[in-house]
């Protein structure tokens, strides 16, 4: 049986590849601070994008994007403010995206990208 941790890592790799293919530039991966952790921080033009990646093998407990609740959104917003100040990127506009990935048992996947998710 594949662990949820390894599914999460696979999802982050798929999301990163997907976004790099769209022309985004990676700034940070698994960035942590006192407010929590965010999976990816990327630059898309003049926006710094804070991206939460959720990966699921099934939707018995809801769609992947539904796992980014209000509490997680608040943490990511606080983290973003801290990051922007610490890295001196206040001139950039922050954006908050969610990447929802579904991977079936055969290894096939689908990616949904929710820009400005919150």
Image (cartoon, rainbow, N blue to C red):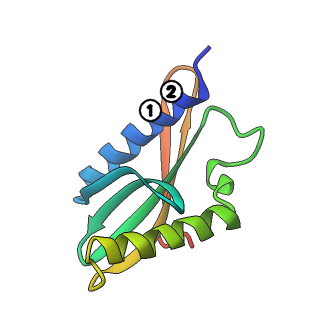
Q: Residue furthest right?
A: 60
Q: Residue 12 location in percent, x, y?
A: 42, 41
| Res. 101 mark | none
In the image, residue 23 above or below residue 74: above
What quarter of the picture does the N terminus occupy?
top right
Report the side of 8 relative to 67 (left or right). Answer: left
- Within 10 Å of disc 1 (Cα), the crowding (few <14, some 14-19, many 20+) is some
Q: Residue 25 location in percent, x, y?
A: 22, 58
Residue at 54% x, 69% y is 117
Q: Residue 2 location in percent, x, y?
A: 58, 18
- Taking depth in this image into account, of 8 and 108 the one nearest to the observer is 8
Separation of marks 1 and 2 at Cα, in angstroms:
6 Å
Report the side of 69 relative to 14 (left or right). Answer: right
Residue at 53% x, 20% y is 106
* CB within 8 Å, label 1 to label 2: yes
- Within 10 Å of disc 2 (Cα), the crowding (few <14, some 14-19, many 20+) is few
What quarter of the picture does the C terminus occupy?
bottom right
Residue at 25% x, 60% y is 24
Q: What secondary structure is found at the residue carrying circle 2?
A: helix
Q: Residue 110 location in percent, x, y?
A: 49, 41
Report the side of 107 relative to 74 (left or right). Answer: left
- Taking depth in this image into account, of 1 and 75 the one nearest to the observer is 75
Q: What secondary structure is found at the residue carrying circle 1?
A: helix
Q: Residue furthest front?
A: 34
In the image, residue 50 above or below residue 94: above
| Res. 6 mark | 2
In the rendered image, which residue does mark 1 sit on? 10
Residue at 68% x, 64% y is 71
- Taking depth in this image into account, of 71 and 47 the one nearest to the observer is 71
Q: Residue furthest bottom?
A: 91
Image quarter for residue 4? top right
> What number of labels is visible?
2
């Amino acid at each position: 049986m594949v662990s949820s941790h390894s599914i999460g890592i696979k999802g982050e790799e798929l999301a990163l590849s997907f976004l790099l293919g769209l022309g985004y530039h990676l700034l940070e991966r698994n960035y942590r601070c006192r407010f929590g952790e965010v999976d990816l921080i990327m630059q898309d033009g003049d926006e710094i994008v804070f991206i939460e990646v959720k990966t699921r093998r099934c939707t018995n407990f809801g769609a992947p994007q539904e796992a980014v609740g209000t509490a997680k959104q608040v943490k990511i917003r606080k983290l973003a403010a801290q990051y922007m100040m610490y890295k001196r990127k206040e001139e950039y506009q922050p954006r908050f995206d969610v990447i929802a990935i579904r991977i079936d048992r055969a290894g096939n996947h689908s990616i949904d990208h929710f820009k400005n998710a919150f």
